[in-house]
Amino acid sequence: MQRRISRWLSVGALATAGAIALSGCGSGFSDTPSDSASGELTSSDDALTVLIGSSGDAETKAVTDAVAAWSTDSGTDAKVTVASDLVQQLSQGFSSGKPADVFYLSTDALAGYAANGSLLAYGDQLANKDDFYPALVSSFTYDDKFYCAPKDFSTLALEINTDLWSEAGLTDADIPTTWDELEAVSKKLTTDDHVGLAIGGEYARVGAFMAQAGGNLMNDDSTEATANSPENVEALTFVQKMLKEGTLKYASDVGAGWGGEAFGKELSAMTIEGNWITGGLQNDFPDVKYTIAELPAGPAGQGTMQFSNCWGIAADSPNQAAALELVEQLTSADSQLAFSKAFGPMPSIQSAAADWSSANPDLVPFLAGADYAKGVPTVKGAADVVTDFNSQLESLKTGDPQQILDSTQSNLEALLG
């Protein structure tokens, strides 16, 4: 059951944990500001600047080549710059009034930049707008406006060490599909040498159980705080039960920095991670044999977390029309499948799903999660609340799930005013 491994360590997969200081929109450098509400876009002979965060040489080359090919076909010059610190450089660009025309933008940065007028809300003008997964569109919608095209995405799935699985007397028929089954196999897999399941002790992993119980920190469009719902209490109570049993441990408690490291070092027989784990295992633990399965269903059914970046376009760009054309090309099926082959991300459009699945049969459980994935809150300031929530989750084993969630609820409600 060993899986073929594909690398994905794209910045789009990594949720930003800290707060982002968002500067106000600069004075701009165009004499013809756009009117996105009327659909009018600025147009000029100016070259486009594209700012990205990169997981490595493969991603840099793939994006640079794609932009260069579009530039040749369109006749519009375009240059890709790889940020050493994307958050900082993006903020500095807006503050100076000279932002990049097109750039990677995370979900937790969307609300701040949208609220201060820095972003062009171009989503409804995309020719392929109906092709994006609905949950991804929700993640990049603010104040009822679809701001930017999701560039790719990741979900969480269950990774299983097949050697340790067999040693415990388990077969393919035992791959868990429910919470009860997950708890049962975790017990069988737990020994003096390794725990059955190890995960990161944070919302970006524990949140999958919340989704399986029918909850999340906020509703889908981040307009209502739902942190202390009965569903979320049930989810944290279940995780707490496994923590107390010792069949589930946080990666930090087994001496690992994240779930993938715990899994790779065989400190755990299972983990819950996104498809970026495949690259990490290939590079650091190539001898570990494993299989990937969809996460078990909870009381409300299947659920997982999704993570994504979008292609932002600056409101101050003097060439928004060309920027929109570039984004449409970068999010086309051909481009996204080429990116996937080069550095591993899953395409954000549904029309590419069949081809991607054929090329990556062992990773299909990640893509299947797109149908039931929940996004992280996108309301301005949510990153701070999630950071506080994470600190409380560290003591979940001995804490009170209701109190933890009540505190988070109050913090989220404060953001909503």
Image (cartoon, rainbow, N blue to C red):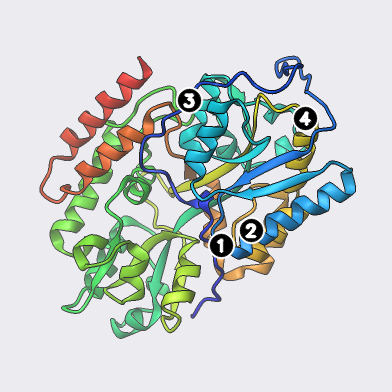
Tag nearer the camera, 3 or 1: 3
Q: CA distance from mark 1 to mark 2?
A: 6 Å
Q: Which residue is mark 2?
A: 60
Q: CA distance from mark 3 to mark 1?
A: 28 Å
Residue type at mark 2: give it. Thr
Of the numbered discs 4 and 1, the one sitting upstream in the chain is: 1
Residue neighbourhood size for the residue with mark 3, other residues' Cα within 10 Å, grouped as few (<14), some (14–19), many (≥20) = some
Q: Is residue 286 above or below residue 238?
A: below
Q: Nearer the viewer, residue 270 or 276?
A: 276
| Circle on res. 23 | 3
Image quadrant assignment for residue 56:
bottom right
Q: Are marks 2 and 4 in contact (CB under 8 Å)?
A: no
Q: Which residue is mark 4?
A: 319
Of the numbered discs 2 and 3, the one sitting upstream in the chain is: 3
Of the numbered discs 3 and 4, the one sitting upstream in the chain is: 3
Q: CA distance from mark 3 to mark 4?
A: 22 Å
Q: CA distance from mark 2 to mark 4?
A: 23 Å
Along the horizontal axis of the image, is 279 left or right of 204? right
Q: Are marks 2 and 3 in contact (CB under 8 Å)?
A: no
Q: Are marks 4 and 1 in contact (CB under 8 Å)?
A: no
